[in-house]
Image (cartoon, rainbow, N blue to C red):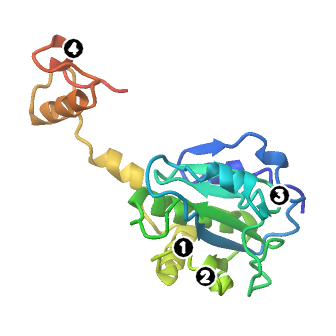
Amino acid sequence: MPYLTQLADVARRTGYPVTEVAGWRSRGHGPQPEVQGIVCHHTAGPAGGGDYPSLAVVRDGRPGLSGPLSQFGLGRSGRIYVIAAGRCWHNAPSTSPRHDNSSSIGIEAENNGTQPWPAAQLDAYRRLCAELCREFGLPASRVKAHREVNTAKPDPHSIDMNAFRAAVAALIAGTTGPTWTEKIVRELPLIRLGDDNNDVKTVRGCLFARGTCPPPPTPACQTGWQGG
C-alpha cells in the first residue's frame, strides 16, 4: 500500500474543519503497508491553552521515539490535523496483529489524561473513525482504544469503547442525526435586519463582551448581528 494521500479527503467527510500539516503527504516511516484497524489515543499533553498544543510532538517525535507518532491529530474543538500519510510509531508492542504500526492508523486526540472530553471533540472522534472504516472497508469492531491493544497504555481515558464503537457502527450505517456543530447552528435564533428583541440583545451583549461591538445605543449594533 502506498502513502495514504487520501486521508485529508477522508477527514473532510466528517464535516469538521481540517488542517493539513505541511509535508504530511510524504511524512512517515516509509509507506503504510496496510490498514486493518484504527487505534484511538490521547496525547497526555499540556492541560491548558490551545486547540492542539501536542502537534509538534506528534509530528516530530520525542526523545527516544522519532516522529511521526500518528497519522491524525484531533483538537479540542473537533478540528482534525492530518499529520502523516505513511507509517507512524503509535502502537508498539501491540497485542493485536491488526493494530500494530504496520497495519493500523493512529489518532492522537488532545487530552491530558484527566480532562473531560468536549462534546465536539468526541463527535469528531467518532465521525473520523467511521469515515476511516468506510474508506478502508473495516467494521466498527476494528476501532480499538490504545489500552485495548497495548497492555502498558491507559488511553484514551474514560471513553467507553463499546458505546464508542456502537456510535461508529451507527454512523457507518447512516442511522445518526446531524453533527454536533450542525445541531448548535440549527438551535441559534434567526436575527433579521431591524430586529430589537431579546435575541438581538443577547447577541449584542456577547459581541460587546468579546470586544467586537460597541455598547448600545451605537447604531451599528442596534440593527442586530448580520454575520461574521
Q: Whole-Å distance between the Cαs marked 3 and 2?
A: 23 Å
User: In this rendering, which labeled residue sits more in front, label 3 or label 2?
Assistant: 2
Residue located farthest toward the front when viewing the structure as drawn: 63
Disc 1 and disc 3 in contact, CB within 8 angstroms: no
Name the amino acid type tagged 1.
Pro
Q: Mark 3 or 2 closer to N-term? A: 3
Q: For numbered disc 2, what is the local secondary structure?
A: helix
Q: Residue at x 62, y 84 (%)?
A: 148
The residue that mark 2 highlights is 147
Q: Position of residue 180 (x, y in %)?
A: 40, 56
* Left or right, 175 with reference to 3: left
Where is residue 65, by image quadrant?
A: bottom right
Q: Position of residue 62 (x, y in %)?
A: 72, 59
User: In this rendering, which labeled residue sits more in front, label 1 or label 3?
Assistant: 1
Name the amino acid type tagged 3.
Gly
Q: Whole-Å distance between the Cαs marked 4 and 2?
A: 54 Å
Q: Residues within 10 Å of mark 2 (few under 14, many from 20)?
A: some
Name the amino acid type tagged 4.
Ala
Q: Position of residue 55 (x, y in %)?
A: 63, 50
Q: Whole-Å distance between the Cαs marked 1 and 3?
A: 23 Å
Marker disc for residue 156: 1
The residue that mark 3 highlights is 86
Disc 3 and disc 2 in contact, CB within 8 angstroms: no
Q: Whole-Å distance between the Cαs marked 4 and 3?
A: 51 Å
Q: Mark 4 or 3 closer to N-term? A: 3
* Left or right, 204 with reference to 54: left
| Residue 10, placed above or below residue 157 | above
Marker disc for residue 220: 4
Marker disc for residue 125: none
Q: Whole-Å distance between the Cαs marked 4 and 1?
A: 47 Å
Disc 1 and disc 2 in contact, CB within 8 angstroms: yes
